[in-house]
Image (tube, helix red, strand yellow):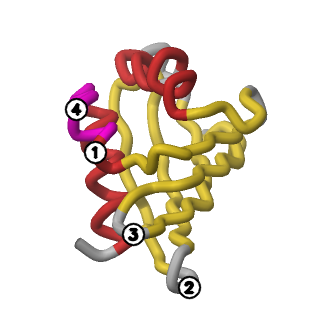
Amino acid sequence: MTNTETVRASFTAFRAQDAAAAERLMADDFVFTSPQDDRIDKAAWLEKCFPTADHFAWQKLIAVTEVDAETVLAYYEYELQTGNRFRNTEIISVRGGRIAEVQVFFGGRVP
């Protein structure tokens, strides 16, 4: 599986709430950072962030691009159940076929 395929599979696992698939794609030393989370580990992400998929009405990957041998940039749009739409960007480090780090940058509301 390529790094971009790994990232796409991770988004699919999240939306499907397939925790087993998500965990298989995550490195043991996985870390996650967003404006709301500062370098939380795999267990904390699975407990806090993973269950939030039901907040989304839909999510669409706009671009998933390999930047270098270990870095993938994911740009996506989503709509919350409230009807508000947003776009975010993630810088994702993939090592040995598993996601080692995710850095999320929140975008603005889409009109």
Could you give the CA–CA distance between mark 4 and mark 3, rounded to whole angstroms?
18 Å
Query: Disc 3 marks which amino acid?
Result: Gly
Q: Position of residue 36 (x, y in %)?
A: 74, 27
The magenta-colored residue range is 16-23
What is the crowding at mark 1: few (fewer than 14 residues within 10 Å), some, or many (at least 20)? Answer: few
14 or 41, which lies in front?
A: 41
Residue holding disc 2? 68
In the rendered structure, are the residues bearing label 4 and label 1 in contact, judged by CB atoms less than 8 Å apart?
yes
Could you give the CA–CA distance between mark 2 and mark 3, rounded to whole angstroms?
14 Å
Query: Disc 4 marks which amino acid?
Result: Ala
User: Element type at marker 4?
Assistant: helix
Residue holding disc 4? 20
Query: Disc 1 marks which amino acid?
Result: Arg
Q: Position of residue 109 (x, y in %)?
A: 66, 37
Residue holding disc 3? 96
56 or 4, which lies in front?
A: 4
Q: Earlier in the sequence, mark 1 or mark 3?
A: 1
Q: Is 107 situated above or below 7?
A: above
- 29 drawn magenta: no
User: Element type at marker 3?
Assistant: loop
Q: Position of residue 103 (x, y in %)?
A: 66, 50
* Residue at horizontal 54 percent and vertical 17 percent from the top: 48
Q: Earlier in the sequence, mark 4 or mark 3?
A: 4
Could you give the CA–CA distance between mark 1 and mark 3, rounded to whole angstroms?
12 Å
Q: Residue furthest front?
A: 28
Query: Disc 2 marks which amino acid?
Result: Asp
Could you give the CA–CA distance between mark 4 and mark 2, rounded to whole angstroms?
28 Å
What is the crowding at mark 4: few (fewer than 14 residues within 10 Å), some, or many (at least 20)? Answer: few
Of marks 4 and 2, the one in the foreground: 4
Residue holding disc 1? 24
* Residue at horizontal 53 percent and vertical 76 percent from the top: 70
